[in-house]
Amino acid sequence: MDTDLENKGPCLGVRHLQAVLLFLATAVNCIAQLNISVVVVAMTDAATANPDFPEYDWSEEQKSYILSSFYWGYIVTQFPAGLLVRRYGAKLMLFIPTFATALLSCLTPVCVSWGGWLAFSVLRLINGLFQGLMFPSVHEHLAKWSPPKERNRLGVFAYSGGECGSVIAMALSGVIASSSLGWPGISYVSAGLCGIWCILWLWLAADSAPSSRLIGGDERDYIERLMGRTDGFHDQKIPIPWRAIWTSVPFYALLVVRGAQGWATSILQLQTPRYMHGVLDMDIKSNALFTALPFLVIWFMSYVYLAIADLIMARKWMSLTTLRKSFNTISYWGPAAALIGIGFVDKNQAGLAIALMTINAGLNAGAGIGNMLTIIDMSPNHSGMLLAITNCAICISPLLSPLLVGVIVTDPSSRAQWQIVFALTAIVFFIGNLVYIIWGTTDQQPWDAADFLKPRDAEQQQQQQAATGAMENQIEKRKGNLSK
């Protein structure tokens, strides 16, 4: 490709604006999703928050239902999300779940006061149904706007919004719960942030470079040329090669490694506040602040990993596949060792436990470069659908993990019971990465080509034409015999 054409893209352009909007999207939605772990503690132990608001006597089993209910809805809409974003575009499909999250957050305090933990679970389930549309849409938007040379940079930045949202959710939720707003204020703040983002998104977002009213001609051509797209590409309806996808070994390796990430993330996000409150005996405010620390480290370390990856690729020290597998190994096997160590500390070693959690989180920050962006590498044309499928594997873990933890951890202050939880998570990390090392790849798959199914269709058409011709010849012969 002509280097002059490659250099025409502006250093800062609309593609970077789209990444900023995606960063904010993942941030505000993660705030609304993850503050639940702090909210549940505040609602069931008013002495650690503002005691002027209602306190609920919920069992550990009921708390587990509340924590897992989101994912029962979330998993249902993953697969439809992949189809819907292909049909309607990411602009609409990202707006809908965020706007719905704003409305549901506003309704939470009133509904919980009326219907208790059951109403809370239903609201969370409905929220999960809507938010299941989000990440396939984010991935599809990245695939449309990220030239290959900038994919790591734009992708890591966009998804790091999740860590930013996690930091804000964990750090501020406890502070809000202890303030005059009480635990209901957490829901109202989440609703306001989601509403502000919706306005920005409708004003500034576009489904693709050609459809943006803000983009200049040079940047539009730069994006389209580097992605090998021609005039009319975005008007094509590329069929999904289902058979090829479901018989692809690298795709199954992605399913396994993404499922392992989902399990570990659900333990870190949903169970850490309970562990710190039960075993380390921390109150809600310090609990929230220290729980936010690992996510702050993830946010920071994701950019460290990105800088190292850019240096490695610029110097051509290793292939993209080797880079992603190396980063993923650090991100999975390092935390596996740290998790085992966490299970052996008690409340007299709270500082060590927090340090190990922070190390765990910092090492795991490389998973975005390690495996998530592999989906776009393998299949930019079907990235939204593939992420929807792999997210189903991810969703099974947080759907089941609170229920399993509820069975294992009958006494939240029992260190021995939490040791079992962390040991299981370490095993999942180890096996998931091993499968990825053996069978994973970043090579663009043959079935990603826009015309992959056309040769087969053409062959079938030729066979049908040949059969029709043979039948017509037989009819003509019979007519000839009859005339004789």
Image (cartoon, rainbow, N blue to C red):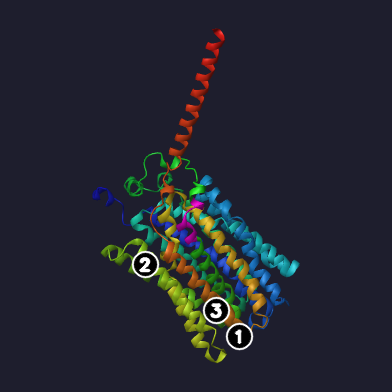
- Amino acid bearing label 2: Leu
Between disc 2 and disc 1, whose residue precedes?
A: 2
Other residues around mark 3 within 10 Å, as few (<14) / some (14–19) / many (≥20): some
Between disc 2 and disc 3, whose residue precedes?
A: 2
Q: Say the numbered circle drawn on residue 416.
A: 1
Q: Can residue 79 be seen here?
A: yes
Q: Disc 2 vs disc 3: which is toward the camera?
A: 3
Residue 358 percent location from the top left of the image: 47, 79
Secondary structure found at label 2? helix
Other residues around mark 2 within 10 Å, as few (<14) / some (14–19) / many (≥20): many
- Amino acid bearing label 1: Ala
Residue that mark 2 sits on: 306
Q: Are marks 2 and 1 in contact (CB under 8 Å)?
A: no
Residue 103 in the magenta stretch? The answer is no
Between disc 1 and disc 3, whose residue precedes?
A: 1
- Amino acid bearing label 3: Ala
Q: Say the numbered circle drawn on residue 423.
A: 3
